[in-house]
Structures are given as C-alpha cells and as structure tokens.
Image (cartoon, helix red, strand yellow):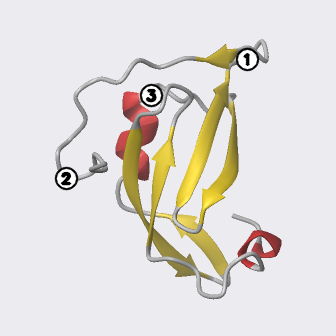
C-alpha cells in the first residue's frame, strides 16, 4: 500500500478484513516492510481463492478503520464477481 494511504490512520491496524463485492469478508494480517504497509498472512490464499491473476487490477476502498472493500477487474476491465466459497477457517472473518 502506498505510504500516503497510511496517513488516514492514527495507527495502522495489524490486520484488515477484506470485503468483496458481494459482502464476504476475509482476514489478512498487515506487516510494515521497508517503510511500506503490506498485506501479509492470508493475502496469498485470498488471491488464490479469488483467482487474481498478475494482469488483473485490484482496488481497495477503506470502509472502516479495519475493513477494506476489494474490487477485482480482469484483463478486459470487467469486474470479477466471486461467490463466497468455503474459506480457510483461519482467515475467514467472523461477522
């Protein structure tokens, strides 16, 4: 995440809930590396489950101090809609 994004926080949270376009949530941890905020544990699994490819565009919108809305666009700039599957219990966010 760009450093400018972090100015919206009093303190950067240690984890975020990622909420997709149909309301499912996924928990990821946050790690500060080389002065940048990175999504850490849970992100690789999220990306695999949601089939995010290297050429896709992923947008993040801050909904609450610990929740980001994630919208994924494919190669043709079409929004990807993912149904909520059974996520790994470790990372599925509890509502």
Looking at the figure, which quarter contains the N terminus?
bottom right
Q: Say left or right for 54 vs 83.
A: right
Q: Residues within 10 Å of mark 3 (few under 14, many from 20)?
A: some
Which residue occupies the foreground of this view, 90 or 33? 90
- At numbered mark 3, what does the secondary structure look like: helix, strand or loop? loop
Mark nearest the camera among 1 and 2 is 2
Q: CA distance from mark 2 to mark 3?
A: 16 Å
Q: Which residue is identified by label 1?
A: 75
Q: Which residue is identified by label 2?
A: 90
Q: Position of residue 37 (x, y in %)?
A: 61, 73
Q: Which residue is identified by label 3?
A: 50
Q: Residues within 10 Å of mark 1 (few under 14, many from 20)?
A: few
- The answer to which image quadrant residue 69 occupies is top right
| Residue at the extreme right of the image, as rendered | 4
Q: Residue at x 47, y 33 (%)?
A: 23
Q: Earlier in the sequence, mark 1 or mark 2?
A: 1
Q: Position of residue 16 (x, y in %)?
A: 47, 62
Q: Residue at x 60, y 40 (%)?
A: 70
Q: Residue at x 66, y 87 (%)?
A: 10
User: Which mark is drawn over residue 39?
Assistant: none
Q: Is residue 32 above or below residue 59?
A: below
Q: CA distance from mark 1 to mark 3?
A: 15 Å
Q: Given contact means CB atoms under 8 Å apart, are the residues at marks 2 and 3 in contact? A: no
């Amino acid at each position: 995440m760009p450093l400018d994004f972090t100015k919206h926080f009093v303190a950067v949270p240690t984890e975020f809930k990622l909420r997709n376009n149909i309301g499912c949530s996924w928990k990821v941890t946050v790690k500060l590396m080389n002065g940048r905020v990175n999504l850490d544990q849970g992100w690789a699994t999220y990306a695999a489950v949601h089939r995010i490819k290297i050429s896709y565009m992923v947008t993040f919108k801050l909904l609450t101090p610990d929740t980001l809305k994630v919208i994924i666009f494919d190669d043709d700039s079409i929004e990807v809609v993912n149904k909520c599957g059974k996520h790994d219990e470790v990372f599925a966010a509890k509502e």
